[in-house]
Image: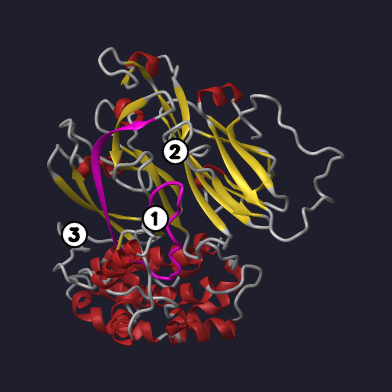
Amino acid sequence: PAVRELPNAARSYGVAQVETMRAGSRIGTWAWRSATSQFSHGDASDAALRPTLLPALLACPQVASGRSQLHTEAAASKNGKDSKAGLLAIGAASGLAALAGLVGSASADSAPSSEAATAGARRPEVQAATHVPAPFEAVKAKQAAASSAGHPEHETVMDNPSHEHEESHRRHWYSPLGRLFYHGHHSGNENPYKIESSNAVHDAEGLPIVPGNKSKAPAVPPACNRDYPVHMVVDLESTSATLPVSLLHKYPFWTYDGTVPGPMIRCRVGDVLEVRYTNNDADGIGHNIDFHAVTGPGGGSAVTYCEAGDVKVATFKMLHPGLFIYHCAAAPVPVHIGNGMYGLVLVEPAGGLPPVDREFYVVQSEVYGEESEENRGVLDPDYAAGLAERPMYVVFNGATNALTEKGPLQAEQGERVRIYFGNAGPNLVSSFHVIGTIFDKVYREGDLLSPPARSVQTTLVPAGGATVVEIDLPVPGNFTLVDHSIFRIDKGAIGFLKVKPRGGDRRRDIYDSADPPAPCPGCKLHS
């Protein structure tokens, strides 16, 4: 609500004139986008902000700083009136950026007082970082150390920085006007986020450079745990691999990073995602990546198309928080998705997500195949079956047994679990359900800004969509993930969540019976 009303509150102070001059326009856009990110979870009303807006602007040192730094450019305007309006817009935008820092940290159920607003505008340092990433090469070294120590599932190991690097980061990010530039609009033909050298710590815009935060299913990358954007460099590689899809069959998959699904990528709203994409497909097939999290033509597919043996690099600004599918969009698109080229991108909101005990990454998909006449036990892709929407298998994480015999999800009694669930399709809608639990929270369609639905039994996830669910586990035992279009369990859409007892309390007040449990013969659901 505050974001929608702030423009109205500020219009009388000259922000409406920001389009009349280039400098004012640029700074104004940066400020509004910065404010949008910071205010996304605020409840401050326009009525509470109006009385404090002008005093805060006048008291804010960024106003004077903005005028000083851009006075030359503004004065070059042919129209003196526009120049004055531009200067006023610069001051207003700078002050509003300071207000964004104040209100973004305010509690959701109270509006800031006039005194607090003015103090916050005078002290932009209240937004100082609580965590700053180590230099790119140092983090890479820690990744290698973590991998050799037996923790290869996470690609990023964050560490507290040295004091010297922290001060360097603050100089780039927390300079009076620096904050405005990171949610910004840019003109011109050059990429503002260019990395000048291989050992650079910041990009050309001043964003700290960090390596990709990604993991293989069902593991989830660690939370971002920061209150500022970064330039995240993600390496992705396309390969072809014949992998088991069931106990009876293998399938000739096309993959991202050699797995189905591809890796889960985790970043934060406002981050710049640099994708360095290499196509090493042994079949010589061209591929690309359509990120549903990306704003721009083809979701990035137009600038990532890569023939075999080529490398493409592209940068994308993460403007919207949420859980998003990514997939190959090279023609024919259904074939590339059906052959395993998909994954999830989690874009955390500015305030992050509430902590939970465990997180899991699960993607449902369909396999359209027919028995190969040349290779026993290997399926050939069946395009006709795809057109008819009649899959041979419907699977979680690429195989019928990926979450059963091969690797069930595991938790402990009393824990709270979050599942990031995607549906790659390419055709079917999923009726996602976990037998024996009720979803305490459901962030429908991957929406992390709206209040979640509560106490939901089953949630629909469309093809090319995603959801986030949270469940509490007060009772130990085995719980079953299914697509409740229930015939699909016989096509492989089944997984287990095994909850180990902890302590002596089995919570018989919640779940009890006179006789011990006895699953029916041949039961797939309650083993």
Distance between mark 2 and mark 1 Cα atoms: 15 Å
Secondary structure under the numbered disc 2 in the rendered image: loop
Near mark 3 (Cα within 10 A), the count class, few <14, some 14-19 or many ≥20, is: few
Q: Amino acid at mark 1?
A: Glu
Q: Residue at x 38, y 74 (%)?
A: 159
Q: Residue at x 19, y 39 (%)?
A: 305
User: Disc 1 marks which residue?
Assistant: 153
In front of the other: 110 or 173: 173
Q: Quadrant of residue 20?
A: bottom left
Q: Which scheme is used to colour this image of the protein? A: secondary structure
In front of the other: 392 or 45: 392
Point out residue 62 in the picture as x, y percentages from the top left corner. 36, 83
> In the drawing, what numbered circle is on residue 305?
none
In this view, 432 is above or below 165: above
Q: Are marks 3 and 2 in contact (CB under 8 Å)?
A: no
In front of the other: 503 or 479: 503
Secondary structure under the numbered disc 3 in the rendered image: loop
Q: Nearer the viewer, mark 1 or mark 3?
A: 1
Point out residue 503 in the picture as x, y percentages from the top left corner. 72, 61
Q: Is residue 191 magenta?
A: no
Q: Is residue 126 visible?
A: yes
User: Disc 3 marks which residue?
Assistant: 191
> In the drawing, what numbered circle is on residue 397?
2
Q: Earlier in the sequence, mark 1 or mark 3?
A: 1
| The magenta segment | 215-244
